[in-house]
Amino acid sequence: MPGRSANRYSSSVPNTLVECVPNFSEGRDAAKVDAIVEAMKVPGVYLLDREMDADHNRSVITLVGEREAIEEAAIRGVGKAAELIDLTRHEGAHPRMGAADVIPFIPIDGVSLEDCVAMARHVGAEIWKRFQIPVYLYEAAATRPERQNLENIRRGQFEGIRDEIATNPARMPDFGEARVHPTAGATVVGARKFLVAYNIFLNTADVSMAKKIAKAVRFSSGGLRFVKAAGFLVRGMAQVSMNLTDFEQTPIHRVFEFVKREAARYGVVPVSSEIVGLIPKQALEQAAEWYLQVESFDSSLILENRLAAVMSGKMAVGGLRAGIEPFIEQLAAPTATPGGGSAAAASGAMAAGLAGMVASMSRGKKAYLEHESQLSEAISRLTQLREQLKQAIDADAEAYNVVMKAYKSAKESADGGQAIAAALQEATSVPLGVAERVVEVGEIATRLKPITNPNMSSDLTTAIALAKAALEGALANVHINVDSIKPDSPESEAFVNRTRELVERLKARG
């Protein structure tokens, strides 16, 4: 395996981080990989790792950066790969279906898995739009349960998909038409938690031992959830090669102990293990806690974690209270903004967050697999609604400030009346948009009740209550603003009438 490199594309580290690990079907021509990496140089994006494998004829690039920046970097990488890689001439040990084969987004800091799902869908749509490369969504972004596993999507590889895509409905891409790009194939884009590539070596050269243990440990044949495994002969030793797709639910120490126990059945023992690529600090903290049996262990007990939290301001006195207290104090201050409209938007955003949390904690669980597509759809939509409602917190305050400015300027301007009318319409539209969104949040939360963990029903009840409160507050702001609009023109009168009609419909739904 050639060496790795690490450098940065921008001059400052962002506060919110998303990892992207695009896999390209080129591992022999360094110049082509250089060009792909160069195309992904976007401000706000950092290159963490680069690996090329000639036998597999594949390269893996690890990037981290801000949300919008890393989306654009991934899209540009796909475009450059399509220019340089011809799958009709490609040969290698690793399965592949696209020049840019797999594009996963992984939440690191300040973003959720649901945020990464929304990113994957945006990137998928852009790849088809810009390059006419069809896109399939996988893992958490999958639109069908069977597409959560990459292996199901990539079955038959480029040639098999090329032959079936137009005639087999199961091959229909999530974005694009039923045809592969003639040389770049199709691309899989998704969102997933951090994947740990973890291998355990045994004190034997008998690869059949590794294969038997791999079969026992992998989930597909009845083993541990979130573990994929195979047996190989590496450096003269039998190796159990694994991907841990959710180390939080199936931690690395549990996997090691399982393999150790299975190996004992065949009279062999693990002699060492290795991590391929990068591993989250939390995964090692879990292992340390388990093996040391520290009582009441918490990651904040680690000196470096405590220092980082204090220095970044994330661990102010008061815990969670510290995050929301400034906004509450702003509401309590003797100023006009933020006011009821901002509070309604914040209430709606919390409702969407709670409902999304419940759906996320039920998705992937065996008891709710039949509802997988509904849960994924709900999570994606709630993520969008949450972001829009968060933006409305400031937008409402800004709209009110514009109204006040328009009233003050009216005495000095001949068209002051028009400025006031325009400002009032905007100040009406913002809480009206909040009302529309919170009604949808409440409806989604209600639909989630019978298809999610009943132990979390109180969270959904709270979400629905918050959505109702947000609706009432938002509509109160709509009323007070629309009542101030003088219907002295056909346009103003039409706006007032449309608004009142929409308010009645929202009341009926909410």
Image (cartoon, rainbow, N blue to C red):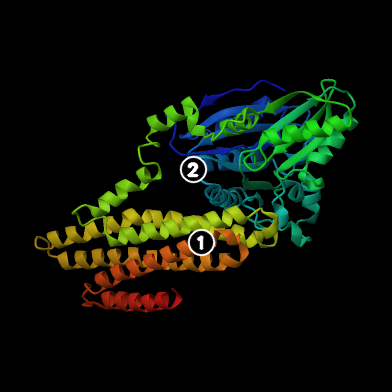
Pointer 1: residues within 10 angstroms few (<14), some, or many (20+)?
Answer: few
Question: Can you identify the residue that label 1 sits on?
Answer: 458
Residue 67 numbered tag: 2
Quadrant in which residue 309 is drawn: top left
**Earlier residue among tags 2 and 1:** 2
- For residue 120, side relative to residue 413 (left or right): right
Q: Which quadrant is the N terminus positioned in?
A: top right
* SS at circle 2: helix
| Residue 230 on image: x %, y % | 81, 36
Of the pair 430 and 472, the residue shown nearer to us? 472
Residue 200 seen in the current view = yes
The vertical placement of 482 against 92, above or below, is below
| Residue 498 on image: x %, y % | 35, 77
Quadrant in which residue 60 is drawn: top right
Q: Amino acid at mark 1?
A: Ser
Of the pair 220 and 34, the residue shown nearer to us? 220
Q: Amino acid at mark 2?
A: Arg
- For residue 285, side relative to residue 158 (left or right): left
